[in-house]
Amino acid sequence: MVISFTGAQSTGKTTLLKAIELDERFCKFNFVPEVTRLVKRRYKLDINEKGDGMTQLAILNAHLI
């Protein structure tokens, strides 16, 4: 199972992720705290408003592998 939080900047995605990481009900889950900026660095792709379909595909791929 893959659970992903997406949304605009400053909407609480990281805060929510940090909160559930501390919740014992999720102790067997693996967490990936940052995908979008990793994609930006690794593939030199624009993100946020400047991102495009390739950016979205790279982010999706990063979540799946």
Image (spheres, rainbow, N blue to C red):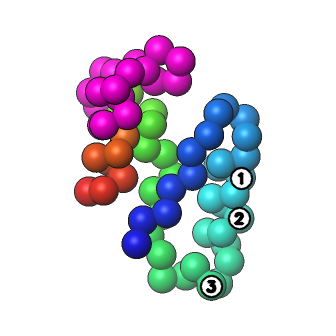
Q: Which residues lie in the magenta part?
A: 41-58
Q: Which residue is mark 1?
A: 15
> What whole-number distance in Å separates the C-alpha atoms at marks 3 and 2?
11 Å
Residue closer to the observer: 4 or 26:
4
Q: Amino acid at mark 2?
A: Ala
Q: Looking at the rendered structure, which numbered label has been put on residue 25?
A: 3
The C terminus - image quarter = bottom left
Circles 1 and 2, Cβ within 8 Å, touching? The answer is: yes
Q: Is residue 7 magenta?
A: no
Q: Which residue is mark 2?
A: 19
Residue 20, image x, y percentages: 66, 69
Relative to 33, is 22 above or below?
below
- Side (left or right) of 31 relative to 10: left
Secondary structure of the residue carrying tag 2 is helix
Secondary structure of the residue carrying tag 3 is helix
Q: Kindly identify the residue that appears in the image at 42 percent across and 65 percent down.
A: 2
Q: Mark 3 packing: few (<14 Cα in 10 Å), some, or many (20+)?
A: few
Circles 3 and 2, Cβ within 8 Å, touching? The answer is: no
Residue closer to the observer: 53 or 32:
53
Q: Looking at the rendered structure, which numbered label has been put on residue 6?
A: none
Answer yes or no: is residue 41 visible. Answer: no
The N terminus - image quarter = bottom left
